[in-house]
Image (spheres, rainbow, N blue to C red):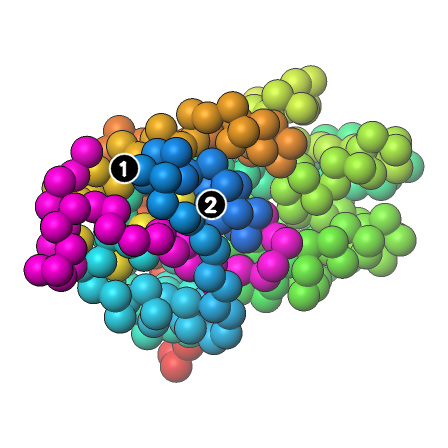
Amino acid sequence: MLAACDSSPDEAVFPSRAIEIVSWATPGGPSDLLARALAEAAPDHFDGRRVSVMTRQGGAGAAGMQYLRSRAGDPHVLGVFTASGTVNMATGRIPFGPGDFTPILRIQVDPFLVAVREDSPFQTLEDLFEAARTRPGEVSMSGFGAASAHFLGFQRLRASAGEPDIRWIAYEGSGDAVVAALGGHTDAVHTNYNIVREHLRAGTMRVLAVALPLTALGDTPVYQDEGYDLAPVHWRGVVGPPGLAPEARADLRERLLATIRTAGFQEYMARAAMEYAVMDDSDAFGAWIAEEVETSRALLGRLGLLVNE
C-alpha cells in the first residue's frame, strides 16, 4: 500500500483522512447505488478510514466533475464515472474531457436490452426490425434521454440492423420508458435488466434480446446470437482527480479491487444484477473512456446532435 501522499506535505501517509466518493447521479439510481455500495464496503481496505458519498448534481454531471477536478492530486477524493459521462463529454454539454480525470478501475457493465409487453406480436429482434422496414416510422422505441448512453446504444443496434425506421421516444427516466411500453404507448423499450426485472417476474414483459449474457436471463439470446455484431452496455467505474501520482493510482486500484471482492459488495452486485467488468489495468480503462467519447462523438455528429454544430 502507498506510504507517501503527494497531495500535501503535511500528509505523510495515505489515507490520512476520510475518503470522499463524489456522485453526480440521481440519488437512488444505479450509479448512486454503486457509490454507496463502495462506501459501505471500502473502510476495511482504507485502513479503517470513513468513506462517504458526496452527491453533487447539476449541469449534466458538471458540478460533480468540477469539484473532482478542483482536487487535483488528492487521492482522498474519488468519483463514480459512467457511460453517461462520456456521452456528455462527446456532445459538448460539459466542458470536460477524459484528460481531466485519472482513470482507476472499471467495475461493472449493465447490458442494454430490448423488451416488449408479454402480448406483443414481436418474438425476436428481427421481427421488430422487419416491422419497421415494412411500416417505416410506425414502430416506436421508448428509452431514457434524447442524447443519452441508452439512446446511443439503441442507435448502434439500429445501425447494425441496416437502420430500420424506428422512432425513439425519449423519457426523463428509464422507469417511465418501461411504463410507456407496458401501456402500449410504444412498441418496445430499450433499457437495462434491473429496470424491467419485476415486470419479467410478474409475466407482463419479456426480453427479445440482451447485449451480453446475464445470469438472470440465461435463456435470452444476446445480440450476436441474433446476427448483430455489437454489445452496447452502460458501464461504471471509479476515477480520481487529475494529477494523481502513479503510485497513488496503483494503490487506489488495489484497495478498490479488495473492496469489490468483499462479500457485502458481491451481494450488492447480485441484487443489482450487474456484471463485473474489471479491465487489465488503469491505462486500459483510460483508453476505454477515450474511445467511448470518440465513438459517441462520431455517432452524435452523424445524427446531428452535437452541441454548437
Read off the magenta span. 1-30
Q: Residue at 55% of width from left, 37% of height from top? A: 111
Residue 124 showing in the rendered view: yes
Element marked by disc 1: helix
Left or right? Give the position of 235 relative to 143.
Answer: left
Point out which mark residue 253 bears. Answer: 1
Give whichever of 202, 166 is nearer the camera. 202
Q: Which residue is at the front of the view, 307 or 64?
A: 64
Residue 154, position in %: x, y? 57, 49
Magenta portion: prevailing SS class: loop
What is the x, y in percent for residue 97?
28, 64
Observer able to see residue 246: no
Q: Is residue 16 above or below residue 130?
A: below
Q: Which residue is mark 2?
A: 39
- Residue type at numbered disc 2: Ala
Residue at the far bottom: name it.
308
Question: Residue at coordinates 27% horizontally, 32% vertically from top-left?
Answer: 254
